[in-house]
Amino acid sequence: MPRTKPSLHGSGVAALRERLFEVTRTNCWPLLEALPVTRFLGESFGISNVSAFRVLNELSDGGHLWRAANGRYFLPEARRMLEKPAPVACLIRKLERWTEVSQEIMHGVDDACGESDRAMLLVHDRVLFRQTDPNAPTAIGSDRNLRQTMEDFLRVHFERIGGVILDELWPDRVLAGFKKQLRSGVVVYRRTKLPFLGSVSADVSGAARLVANHAKQNRFEKISILLPFRGYQPSDEMAHALLAAAKGRLGKPSVATLDSPASLQGLVAGLRKERRRTLLVATEDNAAVAVLDALRQAGIAVPGRVGLVTTMGSRIALDRSMTAAGFDFRLMGAEAARMAIGGPLQHLNLPAAFSPGTTA
């Protein structure tokens, strides 16, 4: 622990030099606190500001002090702590609410920050995300609460961050009000219409084409799109892309929302009556797992007359050998962090990859 901070007073240049030598020898100055400015030292030792500056500069040249980029002088040991690049701030949902996708994205962010010797500042927001279980709809805080959260974050951290990564749940209508304050901001896993932000999202059109081609090659006669709930932008974007890709090939797909046990039961009952070969396309992995379990409990073979594909493709699906047209979420996080750190801000769409499984 450092000693009590000494009083820097005396008379003359030699006295100032000796007092500063004593400070550096005994390490009795707070490590992260700058030494007084030249005006203070000049007045305290009865010398000119120029003379005080020369003493500080002499000690800095000799390695006894360190001069920071802002011109202030510190103990030499402060350099390794204060010269580190500014951390990348991640405004995300609470840790215990991280999905498998969230974990993969943050692994990627950590990879990229490690490459650039950047720290990660994790800002877990209680207002942003509330969900009772993986299959329940998300509840996002009011616009007013989210604006207050962002204002509080910027008030505390604005001066010491070097880029911001934003959870896909942050809505554009809230972020639009922070154009001047959000520097190097990147939204991950969804598109944004805000030109001052970057984004790294999934190429939903590419994934939809993979699904449509797979359906045609395997002679499915119908596509049914399954949403976990309405209002989740990555899922909604995928549904729109699937509707466009299937147009003119397999007729207009049906769209079902699986936001309750009754809706899942209704899906299974409808499939019992359906005679066409149907490809179920889940836009979220937890929904895909719930559907697969329900079909097997009902004695409906998958694959067979019914096939199942997920368009997310996290470990939740791949560990169950599910067929997926999904994405590399670790790469998504890494690209978002690299953009936040070094720019330029742009809108990246990561390509989909088809993973043949046992469900379609």
Image: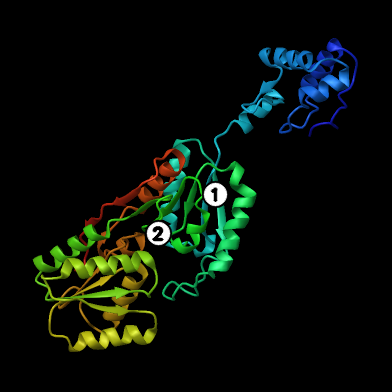
Residue 11 placed where, x, y %?
90, 15
Which is in the foreground here, disc 2 or disc 1?
A: 1
Quarter of the figure that contains the C terminus: bottom left
Q: Position of residue 185 (x, y in %)?
A: 47, 49
Compared to residue 161, the image places residue 174 above or below, namely below
Q: Which mark is residue 206?
A: none
Front-most of residues 66 and 197: 197
Label 2 secondary element: helix
Q: Any mark on residue 101, and which? A: 2
The amino acid type of the residue labelled 2 equals: Val
Question: What element does badge 1 sit on?
Answer: loop
Name the quadrant containing residue 342: top left
Can residue 359 be seen at all in this image of the molecule? no
Q: Is residue 74 above or below residue 336?
A: above
Residue at the spot 38% in from the left edge and 57% down from the top edge? 193
- Position of residue 144 relative to residue 353, above or below, is below
Q: Earlier in the sequence, mark 2 or mark 1?
A: 2
Q: Is residue 155 visible?
A: yes
Q: Closest to the observer: 149 or 80?
A: 149
Which residue occupies 59% across, 60% down? 149
Q: Residues within 10 Å of mark 2 (few under 14, many from 20)?
A: many
User: Which residue is at the front of the view, 320 or 280?
Assistant: 280
Q: CA distance from mark 2 to mark 1?
A: 28 Å
Q: Amino acid at mark 1?
A: Gln
